[in-house]
Amino acid sequence: MSYLQESATTRGLVTISKLQEMRQAGEKIAVLTAYDASFTALMDQAGIDVILIGDSLGNVVQGESSTIPVTLEHMVYHTSCVAKGQESAFLIADMPFGSYSTPEQAMLNAAELMRAGAHMVKLEGGAWLAQTVKFLVERSVPVSAHLGLLPQSVHTIGGFKVQGKSTESAQMLINDAKALQEAGAQLLVLEAIPSELGKKVTDAIQIPTIGIGAGPDCSGQVLVMHDMLGAFPGRSPKFVKNFLSGQSSIEAAFKSYIQEVKTGKFPGPEHCFKST
Ligand SMILES: Nc1nc(=O)c2c([nH]1)NC[C@@H]1CN(c3ccc(C(=O)N[C@@H](CCC(=O)O)C(=O)O)cc3)CN21
Ligand SMILES: CC(C)C(=O)C(=O)O
Ligand SMILES: [Mg+2]
């Protein structure tokens, strides 16, 4: 049965082992963000594999200009809303800025997100986070890493800029990915890096990679829901595509996104970054 013929009620729970199997089988993983129960139910029934409760809610829900002001309390609240709408999809919750500065602090905060209904938590950062990842995984909290453009680091970077363009920074990113996998991370989000590097990182590790502006060779793709529905005012990053235009409903837009990710139609070259 293809993913399109399967109904949400018969497809069963998406688990981390299912995502690992999909990577091995070459079936692309379709991911969207959600922040409430209603949109969660619609995208889950459309067949989305993974839903990310992103700290991008700072931008798209709260009207902030970065994710920095988002608190653990906000993330817990939206995670519990999403958990109410979930049927089959695997749920990942972002740990917000400043909530994982030490392994112990990370564990207490991750536990709150897991109690709210998350199946995995996501942290932004490189090899310096390996100890924290190991600490969480040992205590039964599944972890997704996040490399490339790290929005929580916007003020140390000095803006939202494509990462890994130089040979040195590309090699560092590959080393970070290996270190985080070694520490026990079971998924890796890659944001705003050249497509060539997205492929190199994916080839260098065994866990699934989920790209946003990281090229077509990642194991899966993620977009912010408001962006892919054309519901976010202002200028969109290059990797955004509007999936509602040409469709007659939000459900149809979700299905179109899932189909384009599964068939490899999205992302096209116009949504990707080059090395030079
Ligand atoms: N609505 C929304 N969509 C997102 O994808 C998103 C958020 N919010 N908030 C958190 C982070 C911030 N993100 C961003 C924000 C801006 C760019 C951006 O302006 N990128 C430029 C590239 C700049 C360069 O060339 O160096 C672009 O043209 O895409 C990228 C990712 C991704 N995340
Ligand atoms: C853009 C994705 C990867 C994210 O971290 C978010 O939505 O917060
Ligand atoms: Mg985030």
Image (cartoon, helix red, strand yellow):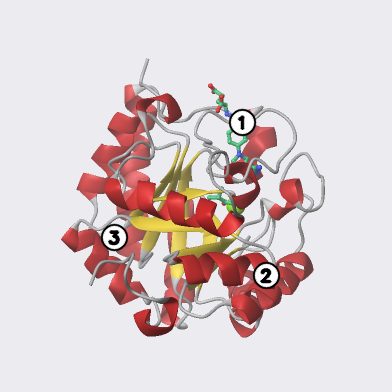
In depth, the one of 267 and 174 nearer the eye is 267
The image quadrant where one finds the N terminus is bottom left
Question: How far apart are labels 3 and 2 at the CA level?
Answer: 30 Å
Q: CA distance from mark 1 to mark 3?
A: 26 Å
Circle 1: element type: loop
Disc marking residue 160? 1
Q: Earlier in the sequence, mark 3 or mark 2?
A: 2
Q: Quadrant of residue 215?
A: top left
Amino acid carrying mark 1 in the image: Phe
Which class describes the residues within 10 Å of circle 3: few (<14), some (14-19), or many (20+)? many
Q: Is residue 68 above or below residue 30?
A: above
In the image, farthest residue toward the top: 276
Q: Earlier in the sequence, mark 1 or mark 2?
A: 2
The answer to whether the residues at label 3 and label 2 have Cβ atoms under 8 Å apart is: no
Where residue 81 appears, as percent x and y from the top left, is 70, 75
The reply to whether the C-beta atoms of the residues labelled 1 and 2 are less than 8 Å apart is: no
Residue 144 vertical position relative to residue 172 in the rendered view, above or below: below
Residue topped by disc 2: 38
Quadrant of the frame with the C terminus:
top left
Q: Is ligand 1 less than 8 Å from the beta carbon at label 1?
A: yes
Residue furthest to the front: 248
Q: Which mark is residue 207?
A: 3
What's the amino acid at mark 2? Ser
Query: Mark 2: which secondary structure?
Result: helix
9 is higher (above) or lower (below) than 242:
below
Q: Is residue 77 left or right of residue 260?
A: right
Residue type at numbered disc 3: Ile
What distance separates the C-alpha of mark 1 from that of mark 2? Answer: 30 Å
Image disc number at residue 107: none
Quadrant in the picture for residue 93:
bottom right
First in residue order: circle 1 vs circle 3: 1
